[in-house]
């Protein structure tokens, strides 16, 4: 493993705070303590351009900045708290916390039922505390893991989180580091794991002072965000160390159970050992120290099993990756949309292929990308693929941010839920989908730089050029856009929404009770001749899912020896009512799903 070095401010009771940062070209460096009057302490230069010093009087709550060569003062790039925002002084914190989760050892990955949420829009409060208040509802639904969209300090109080500029600092407006620890502790007490979305492929534009310290970026590559983070150019060991220390901090000090690594295809590294492999090796070492498993889950659009194959087999050893192919197959078949990147999808047989082999594009030519993409994932365990029918990207990157609630019928929402929850893969829900939330999830920011705001508005409009969406994109800077994206949690007032939520709950209970050990090898999937009815059967569990995608009733035969467990057309699930199930012959209502179990 490469160079490892603690960075940032580390407080030790009765000794004070040690400050460490990397600035290889600086001739002189100081830490400035913002106490009654500013107190300046010179730092000593060590190998590779690290600057280190001890301030005995600096304790939790002390504000500080770093000064380079008697010039400007900057917040700490590895700041763990920015109580006054991205442009102001950093704050020393303590990792002493009265944890109550000593018996928590994380869950096996195959038991994860993930619920992705955005802290600012999930609850009325828009804070970590607001999530804690909703944990009983998530526990009742059957959720076993929540996934937080990025919470690293970003400018202002409204942001998806991908404009974060202090990767080590939990967003102050959400409740800061103490609020996050309280949330993790409460989740573990409820038996719920915590996945944190982290961004190692770029830093946001406003409040990003890292380039003032050293070569954190390289011009070797162009990315959608400008110069790439420096993972393989001169001085890259120390940039790699910065992000490795970040991951270890979340897992060790905040007791996060898994990290979702944003867009790893944009982590550009041609070195002999890819950054992701090195990161996984450090996480493996932490697992051995703490005697508990941690999971790294990649988001990638490359369909490359190298990410999740074992290190000894030439892979990077990550636990899992998101699988867009599954989402795109579901979305196109149920909505009929085939614009933009959806043009590569839309055939019902794609669902059969992705159920059995994971990637649809597994060495196939993509007409949209104009090149061959993907590798064969048939041999990889199903738990290594996280699947969904909605997520922040697929909803929020639509022009108007509409959820499936607005794109398909109420009846179709139920087969879609079954495709995700009863698949062999690791299922993920997007906040609010379980009851059919009708508010959109739109893109929002709260930058203070007017030119940057205009650039964001322009960029959003350009993103939609390949889609045939009608209307005007909401203003990302407007507070109204943010407020429109808040969940209503309205299922307690709506009978239909409550019925849908109960249907989700029933599917989740089925998965937990009957489908404990799932694998693709023991799954059969077929389509009827008209490609309107999909059947997939978990042969080892004796569970069959039958889905009618068409708007007409369909009849299937050959079901002797199977008993009905669930029919989405039943009135108790808000359906139109269903015919009685007679042995061997079933009439499927339009846009419905049946779940059958083999008779003992």
Image (cartoon, rainbow, N blue to C red):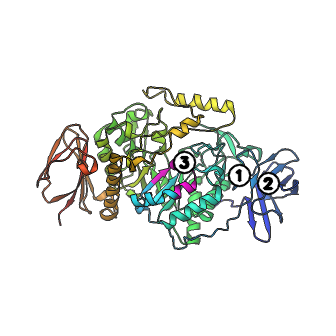
The image quarter containing residue 402 is top left
Mark 1 and mark 2 lie on one chain; the one further toward the N terminus is 2
Instruction: Tell me, yes or no, whether the two marked residues, 1 and 2, touch with CB atoms within 8 Å.
Output: no
Q: On the rendered structure, is 527 left or right of 215?
A: left
Residue at the (54%, 40%) spot, across then down: 483
Residue 314 visible? no
Label of residue 553 in the image: none
Could you tell me which secondary element the residue under label 1 belongs to?
Answer: loop
Front-most of residues 574 and 198: 574
How far apart are the alpha carbons under marks 1 and 2? Answer: 12 Å
Q: Position of residue 235 (x, y in %)?
A: 72, 50
Label of residue 64 in the image: 2
Foreground tag (3 vs 2):
2
Residue at the (43%, 57%) spot, across then down: 137
Q: Which residues are magenta?
A: 115-132
Label of residue 262 in the image: 3
How far apart are the alpha carbons under marks 1 and 3? Answer: 25 Å
* Tag 1 residue: 83
Mark 1 and mark 3 lie on one chain; the one further toward the N terminus is 1
The image quarter containing residue 3 is bottom right
């Amino acid at each position: 493993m490469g160079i490892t070095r603690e960075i940032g401010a580390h407080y030790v009771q009765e000794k004070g705070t040690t400050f460490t940062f990397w600035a290889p070209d600086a001739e002189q460096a100081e830490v400035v303590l913002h106490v009654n009057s500013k107190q300046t302490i010179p730092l000593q230069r060590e190998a590779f351009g690290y600057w280190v010093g001890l301030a005995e009087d600096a304790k939790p709550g002390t504000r500080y900045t770093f000064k380079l060569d008697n010039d400007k003062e900057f917040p700490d790039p590895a700041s763990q708290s920015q109580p006054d925002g991205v442009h102001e002084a950093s704050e020393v914190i303590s990792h002493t916390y009265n944890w109550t989760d000593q018996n928590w050892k994380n869950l096996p990955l195959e038991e994860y039922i993930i619920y992705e949420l955005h802290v600012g829009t999930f609850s009325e409060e828009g804070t970590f505390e607001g999530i804690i208040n909703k944990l009983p509802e998530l526990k009742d639904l059957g959720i076993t893991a929540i996934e937080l969209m990025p919470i690293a300090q970003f400018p202002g109080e409204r942001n998806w989180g991908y404009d974060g500029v202090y990767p080590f600092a939990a967003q102050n407006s959400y409740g800061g580091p103490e609020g996050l620890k309280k949330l993790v502790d409460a989740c573990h007490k409820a038996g719920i794991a915590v996945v944190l979305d982290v961004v190692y492929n770029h830093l946001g534009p406003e409040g990003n002072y890292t380039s003032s310290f050293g070569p954190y970026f390289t011009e070797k590559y162009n990315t959608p965000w400008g110069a790439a983070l420096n993972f393989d150019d001169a001085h890259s060991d120390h940039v790699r160390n910065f992000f490795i220390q970040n991951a270890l901090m979340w897992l060790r000090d905040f007791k996060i159970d898994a990290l979702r690594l944003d867009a790893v295809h944009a982590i550009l590294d041609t070195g002999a050992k890819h950054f992701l492999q090195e990161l996984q090796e450090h996480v493996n070492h932490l697992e051995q120290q703490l005697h508990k498993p941690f999971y790294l889950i990649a988001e990638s659009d490359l369909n490359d099993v190298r990410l999740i194959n074992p290190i000894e087999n030439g892979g990077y050893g990550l636990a899992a990756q998101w699988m867009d192919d599954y989402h795109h197959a579901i979305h196109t078949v149920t909505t009929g949309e085939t614009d933009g990147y959806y043009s590569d999808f839309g055939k019902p047989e794609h669902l059969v292929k992705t159920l059995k082999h994971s990637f649809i594009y597994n060495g196939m030519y993509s007409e949209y990308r104009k090149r061959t993409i993907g590798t064969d994932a048939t041999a990889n365990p199903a738990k290594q693929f996280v699947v969904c029918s909605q997520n922040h990207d697929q909803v929020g990157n639509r022009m108007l941010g509409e959820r499936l609630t607005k794109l398909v019928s109420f009846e179709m929402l139920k087969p879609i839920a079954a495709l995700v929850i009863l698949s062999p893969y690791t299922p993920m829900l997007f906040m609010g989908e379980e009851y059919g939330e009708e508010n959109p999830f739109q893109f929002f920011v709260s930058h203070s730089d007017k030119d940057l705001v205009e650039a964001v508005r322009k960029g959003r409009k350009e993103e939609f050029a390949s889609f045939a969406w009608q209307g005007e994109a909401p203003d990302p800077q407007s507070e109204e856009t943010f407020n429109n994206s808040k969940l209503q949690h309205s299922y307690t007032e709506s009978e239909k929404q409550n019925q849908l939520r109960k249907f989700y709950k029933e599917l989740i209970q089925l998965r937990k009770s009957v489908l404990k050990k799932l694998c693709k090898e023991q799954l059969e999937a077929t389509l009827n001749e008209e490609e309107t009815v999909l059947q997939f059967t978990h042969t080892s569990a004796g569970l069959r899912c039958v889905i009618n995608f068409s708007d007409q009733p369909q009849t299937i035969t050959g079901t002797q020896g199977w008993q009905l467990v669930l029919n989405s057309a039943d009135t108790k699930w808000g359906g139109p009512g269903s015919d009685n199930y007679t042995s061997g012959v079933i009439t499927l209502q339009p846009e419905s799903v049946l779940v059958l179990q083999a008779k003992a």
